[in-house]
Image (tube, rainbow, N blue to C red):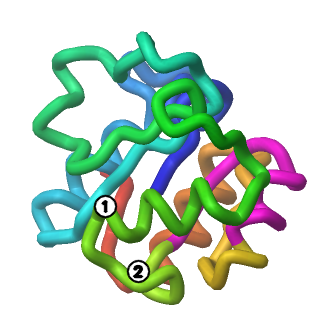
Amino acid sequence: MLDYGGVLTDHGEDGAVEPPLVTALRKAKKHGLRTAVLSNADGWWAPPMEWSPLVDVTITSGSVGIAKPDEEIYLITARRMNLKPEECVFVDDLAVNVRGAARAGMVGVHHRSTRSTLEELEILLAIALRD
């Protein structure tokens, strides 16, 4: 589960053409992992169309009437993915949102740089996510 602004839009330290976390989504899908975008955007927002094969579920605060870091928004997302919260990893650039996910029972990753986030995700998921 990934936040959009600040995480999926981060082109990284090397200025990659495709944001490194989008590349990671591609690799995660190839390994059969379920993916979601969870954003505090309004109900009209959606990820770019070219990402649709990479994302199983998109939840926005505007569409469910609850915003991060309220625990319920993470639980809604997990349910829509047919996963238990403890089976989910949530990545956000705001620590308060990561703490909300942890309170909901998820593993939280505080995104500070693409390198550190990818390193942590590769350990948690036990798959290679970088080229």
Figure disc tally: 2
Query: Which region shows up in magenta?
Result: 89-101
> Residue 118 at x, y = what percent?
53, 59
Q: Residues within 10 Å of mark 2 (few under 14, many from 20)?
A: few
The structure residue drawn at horizontal position 42% and vertical position 11%, both measured from the top left corner, is: 44
State the mark number for residue 80: 1
> In screen coordinates, is 86 left or right of 45?
right
Q: Position of residue 54 (x, y in %)?
A: 20, 42
Q: Does label 2 or label 1 sit earlier along the sequence? A: 1
The correct choice, above or below, for 14 with respect to 26 in the image is: above
In the rendered image, the vertical position of residue 25 relative to residue 41, given as above or below: below
Disc 2 residue type (three-letter): Leu
Whether pointer 2 and pointer 1 mark residues with C-beta atoms closer than 8 Å, the reply is no
Q: For residue 41, say whether it is visible.
A: yes
Name the residue carrying label 2: 125
Seen in the image, is 78 located left or right of residue 86? left
Residue at (35% x, 39% y) in the render:
58
Say what secondary structure mark 1 lies in.
helix
The quadrant holding residue 71 is bottom right
Q: Residue furthest top?
A: 44
Of circles 2 and 1, the one toward us is 1
Residue 26 coordinates in the image, percent (x, y): 22, 47
Q: Amino acid at mark 1?
A: Arg
Residue 46's disc number: none
Q: Position of residue 106 (x, y in %)?
A: 60, 78
Image quarter for residue 72? bottom right
Up-down: is 39 above or below 124?
A: above
| Residue 11 can be seen in this image | no
